[in-house]
Amino acid sequence: MDRFSWSNGLLEINETLVIQQRGVRLYDGDDKAKLDVGVALLSTHRLIWRDVKNHECCIAMPLSQILLFEEQAAGIGKSAKIVIHLQETPANKEPGPYQNSKYSFIKLSFKEHGQIEFHRRLTEEMTQKRWESTPVSQPISAGTSSQAGRTRAVGIVGIERKIEEKRKETDKNICEAFEDLSKLMVKAKEMVELSRSIANKIKDKQGDISEDETIRFKSYLLSMGIANPVTRETYGTGTHYHMQLAKQLGDMLQAPLEERGGMMALTEVYCLVNRARGMELLSPEDLVNACKMFESLKLPLRLRVFDSGVMVVQLQSHSEEEMIASALDYVTDKGSLTAEEFAKLLGLSVLLSKERLLLAEKVGHLCRDDSVEGLRFYPNLFLNA
Amino acid sequence: MHRRGVGAGAIAKKKLAEAKYKERGNVLAEDQIVQMSKQLETFKSNLEEFASKHKQEIRKNPQFRVQFQEMCATIGVDPLASGKGFWSEMLGVGDFYYELGVQIVEVCLALKHRNGGLITLDELHQRVLKGRGKYAQDVSQDDLMRAIKKLKVMGNGFGMIPVGGSYLVQSVPAELNMDHTVVLQLAEKKGYVTVSEIKESLKWEKERACHVLDHLLKEGLAWLDSQASGEAQYWLPALFSEIISRDVTPEEANQMTP
C-alpha cells in the first residue's frame, strides 16, 4: 500500500477511464487497509481508488508499478479479490496513505462483484500499456487546483453521471419487469384455481369426463407447470408429449445401453440426452415421466428403481438371472470383490456394479463382509454347504 | 282446491331437478376445460409479451430469478417441471436450469472417487463456473440449489446438508442420518474431527462417535489419519478445498514445518 499517492482523482488529458467498480476494499498485503469501502477506477494510466463517503480521500498509482496480478476466487464469507504484485517504490513517489509497508502486494476485494470485468480490463490495459504511448504531464498532486483542473473535473464527473444514469435506468427496467411479472402471476394464479376446480370435479365423478378431455387437461397442466392431482392408471402422469419422448428415448438409448452392459443410471441418461439435444432440454421430471411409459408403450426398455432409490434404465432383454449369475461368476473367480473392483472389471460405474452385487446378495448367491475397509462380497458358501 | 307440494308429483319434480343439476354439473366441468383452453391461449400471449420485454432480465439477473421462482412457488406453479412448459419454452428458464443440472452431475461424478460423493456448495459452484467458461452466463448458488432440487427426482441421492452457514451437496445414495450430519457440521471448521472432539462437543458416548465415524469411512466420505499426533483424525475430503485455498503467510508456513 505504500505505492499509492494522494490524488484528486482527476484524469489527465489523454488519460481515459476504462472501468470503475463500486464496493471495493483495499488490502495492504493480507491485512485490510485502514480505509473504508470505496470505488476502484482503472484508467489507461493509473489505478485510482476513492472513498465513497469522503471524496477527498482519493489515491492513485501508475499502472507501470504493477508487476503481475491474479484473481483470488471468492469463498464462504469472502469476496472475490484481485491480488496485485508491485514493483519497488520509485524514489520520486509522491506521499500517500502509507509511508511504508512490509508487503509488496495489494488486494482489491470486490464486495459487490465485478471482479471478472475489472480483471479483464486490467489485463487489456497491462497488455496494451497505453500509458507508454500517450504520455501525460506530471500528475497533479493533492491540493493543487487550477483552471485546467476544473475543466478536467467535468470529464470524470460527466462519465460518472452517465454511469449513474445507466444504473438508474437498469433499476427502472427491473422495477418494470417486476411489475409486469406480478401482473402475469395474478393471471397464472387464476389458471391454477381453475385447474383445481376441474381436478376436483374429475375426482368426484370418475367416469364422466372423457379420456380425451383428461389427456387434454393434463397437457394444460404441463404447460402451466401445475402439479397434476389426477392420475390415471393407463398413462400415469404422462401426456402425448411424454409418449413421444418415450419413443424417442427407445430409439436413442439402444446403442448406449448395449455398450454399458444393458443398464444406465437415470442421471447418466439425463446428461447423455441433454448433451445431445443442445437446446430444448428435458427436465428431470420429463425424463422420469417418459421412462415410466416404456412398459405401456411396449418399448424394449424399462425404468427400474432399486431398493437404494437409485433409478436406472435397462434393456428389457437384459435378464435378471444373467446379471446375477455373472456377478456370482466374477466373485467366485476372484474370491471376493468390492463394488469398486467389480466396476473396474466390468467397465461399469461403481453405482451400478454395487447394485448388481446387492441383487445377487438378495437372492442369496453372495455374502457380504461389512467392515471399516469397505463392503466386500463373497460367494455364499452356506448355500452350497 | 287441490294441494300441491306434497306427494308423488313433488317427488318426481325433485328427481327431475336433481337429474338436470347432475347433467349441468357434467357440462360445467367440460365447459371449464374449454374455458381453461381459452384462458391458456390468452396467458400464453401475455407470457410472450412479457418474454419479449424481460427475457434478458431472467437470464442476466440472479436476484430476478429468485423472485420469479418464489412468486411461482407461492401460486403453486413449478416453472421447471417440464421442458415443454410455457415458462421453459418462452422465458428460457428451463434450458438454463436443466443444463446446469447436467454440469452439476458431471462435476459430482468426476470428484466422487476423491470425496465419496460429498462436496461443499462453494466448491461445486466454483467448479461449475469454471466448466462453463468465462463468457457463459454467471450462476448464483441459489441457481445451483434449485437445479439440485430438480435432480432429486431422478433418484440418485442428491441432497443438501446444512453445514457452517452453507451446504454440503450429497450426490450418492449414502444414508446419512442426523448423527452423521451433526458430525459433518462439527468437522467443517478444520476439515477433520476426532473422537474426543465429538465426545466433548456433542456429549456422546465413545461407541456412538465411533459408529458414526466408521460409517463415514465406509461410505468413502472420510479418510482416517492414524498417524496424527495425539489421537486419530478423521478428515473429510469434501471440506478440503476451503482449507487449501486459504493463503498461508510465511510465518504460518514456518510454524508448520516441524
Image (cartoon, coloured by chain):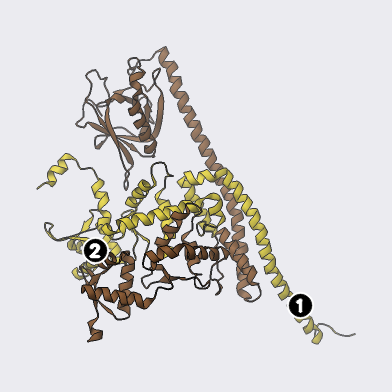
Chain colours: A brown, B yellow
Q: Residue at x 33, y 42 (%)?
A: A79
Subunit ID for the residue under disc 1: B
From the viewer's perspective, tell me whether residue B225 is left or right of residue A59.
left
Measured from the top left, where is residue A270 in percent x and y? Answer: 43, 60
Find the distance from the CA under tag 2 to the CA under tag 1: 71 Å
Q: Residue at x 26, y 26 (%)?
A: A3
Question: The disc labelled 1 sits on which kind of residue?
Answer: Ala
Q: Which mark is residue B17?
A: 1
Measured from the top left, where is residue A233 in percent x and y? Answer: 55, 75
Measured from the top left, where is residue A130 in percent x and y? Answer: 36, 23
Question: The disc labelled 2 sits on which kind of residue?
Answer: Leu
Location of residue A15 with respect to A39 vertically, above or below: above
Measured from the top left, where is residue A22 in percent x and y? Answer: 39, 34
- Residue closest to the eye, B76 or A301: A301
- Residue closest to the eye, A207 or A140: A207
Location of residue A149 with respect to A276 vertically, above or below: above
From the viewer's perspective, tell me whether residue B45 is left or right of residue A125.
right
Quadrant in the picture for residue B114:
bottom left
Which image quarter holds the N terminus of chain A? Answer: top left
